[in-house]
Amino acid sequence: MLLLISPINSEEALEAIEGGADIVDVKNPKEGSLGANFPWVIRNIRKLTPEGMHVSATIGDVPYKPGTVSLAAAGATVSGADYIKVGLYGTKNYDEALEVMKNVVKAVRELKEDALVVAAGYADAHRVGAVDPMEIPRVAAEAGADIAMVDTAVKDGKTLFDFMDVEAQARFTDETHKYGLKTALAGSVKAEQLETLYNIGCDIVGIRGAACVGGDRNTGKIHRSAVSKLKKVIENF
């Protein structure tokens, strides 16, 4: 299981790298769960990230505007991201989500054939009117994406486990794997929850809060010691 750590700037990115993160995921919590950062931040983090270590970029909790979202995906791709992560926030159903993701995949592939596209839904989709998270594996597969993900839309202290029990997480993971895709799970995940995710076959776990000093994704800063502890937990499974 790969450890994805989400810094907001170059300083935090260096902490994630030194701590042993597998994937450096550039995001901007001020703009939401999967808030987009600036192109120059992605470029700067790509430059300081060692060759062979992947850089991911979130492009936002996106609206149902396929053209706008595709343009954002293209921007993240040319800025150097290896993973393009789309939060399907404004898509209310399967058809809308599929339309957005198909166009994102087309935009990304035209620029970088080996880039990985992530279709991300929300475990608490009912709180924001987004597409059912259990539809995400099929959306990802039909769109030609590479990874199906679940996060939480509202960051209020509740975690992935508050909205998807282990059985639902396992169903999501198994369904994703049946399509030949990889799965990513996130949502204020705690260190003590990593073993459960590992046991159900999660390929990538996304973390910010637990990698920050004080455990707060908004007021804390990522520190290498916290990242290193999370990495060691996973390595010991």
Image: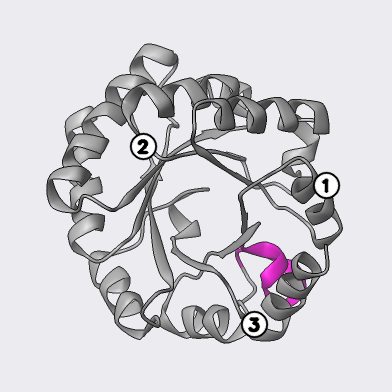
User: Residue at label 2?
Assistant: 62
Q: Quadrant of the N terminus?
A: bottom right
Name the element at disc 3: loop
Pick whichever of labels 1 and 2 is earlier in the sequence. 2
User: Residue at label 1?
Assistant: 196
Q: Quadrant of residue 150?
A: top right
Name the element at disc 2: loop
Q: Is residue 181 magenta?
A: no
Q: Which residue appears at 76% of the width and 44% of the height?
A: 158
Q: Is residue 13 visible?
A: yes
Pick whichever of labels 3 and 2 is earlier in the sequence. 2
Pointer 1 and pointer 2: residues touching (CB < 8 Å)? no
126 or 189: nearer the eye? Answer: 189
166 or 34: nearer the eye? Answer: 166
Q: Is residue 40 above or below residue 11?
A: above
The segment highlighted magenta reads: 208-218
Q: Is residue 138 above or below residue 19?
A: above
Whole-percent x, y for residue 229 in the image:
77, 77
Q: Quadrant of the C terminus?
A: bottom right
Whole-percent x, y for residue 188 in the image:
70, 52
Pick whichever of labels 3 and 1 is earlier in the sequence. 1
User: Residue at label 3?
Assistant: 223
Of circles 1 and 2, the one toward us is 1
Left or right for 110, reference 192:
left
Whole-percent x, y for residue 214 in the image:
76, 74
139 or 94: nearer the eye? Answer: 139
Instruction: Point out the residue furthest to the left here.
Output: 110
Q: Gap between marks 1 and 2, in whole Å?
A: 29 Å
Q: Gap between marks 3 and 1, in whole Å?
A: 24 Å
Three-letter code for the amino acid on which mark 3 is drawn? His
Three-letter code for the amino acid on which mark 1 is drawn? Thr
Pointer 3 and pointer 2: residues touching (CB < 8 Å)? no
